[in-house]
Amino acid sequence: MAAMNIEEDEVDEREKLIENKLNEEMELSLENKVQKVQQASLRAITRELNLEERLRREEMMKAKEETKVLMKKMKVETEKKEKIEQAIE
């Protein structure tokens, strides 16, 4: 009987060790999954920010180009006006 108690105690201890080991592995697995999700989220946010920056730069370049075109038109119109005024005089 005493031998059976020792074996049962050993089995119980091994069960506890295995259970603890499984719990640790599950925790590590979950932590790894959480870390991977966080990294993927960070990459997505970074891509989004880069895209927004690129769009902002494109908008600024487009606005500058439009300003240039309008300035040229204004210059042409001013020259026309001056020529008309000279012709009238």
Image: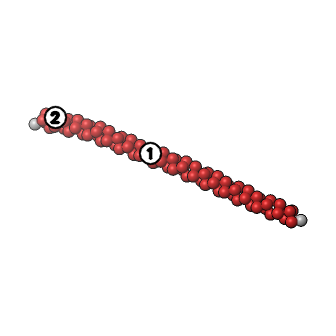
Q: Nearer the viewer, residue 51 or 46?
A: 46
**Furthest-left residue in this view:** 89
Q: Nearer the viewer, residue 36 or 76?
A: 36
Residue 24 location, quadrant = bottom right
Rendering coords of residue 20 (x, y %): 70, 59
Q: Residues within 10 Å of mark 2 (few under 14, many from 20)?
A: few
Q: Residues within 10 Å of mark 1 (few under 14, many from 20)?
A: few
Q: Nearer the viewer, residue 3 or 39?
A: 3
What's the residue at 29%, 37% (across, down)? 69
Q: Quadrant of the C terminus?
A: top left
Q: Is residue 5 above or below residue 56?
A: below
Dot 1 lies on which element? helix
- Chain-order first, disc 1 or disc 2: 1
Label 2 sits on residue: 83
**Furthest-front residue in this view:** 2
What's the residue at 39%, 41% (across, down)? 58
Rendering coords of residue 42 (x, y %): 51, 50
Give the amino acid type for the residue marked by disc 2 in the picture. Answer: Lys
Give the amino acid type for the residue marked by disc 1 in the picture. Answer: Asn
Rendering coords of residue 26 (x, y %): 67, 55
Q: Are marks 1 and 2 in contact (CB under 8 Å)?
A: no
Q: Is residue 72 above or below residue 25?
A: above
The answer, for residue 66, to whether it is visible in the render is: no
The tag on residue 50 is 1
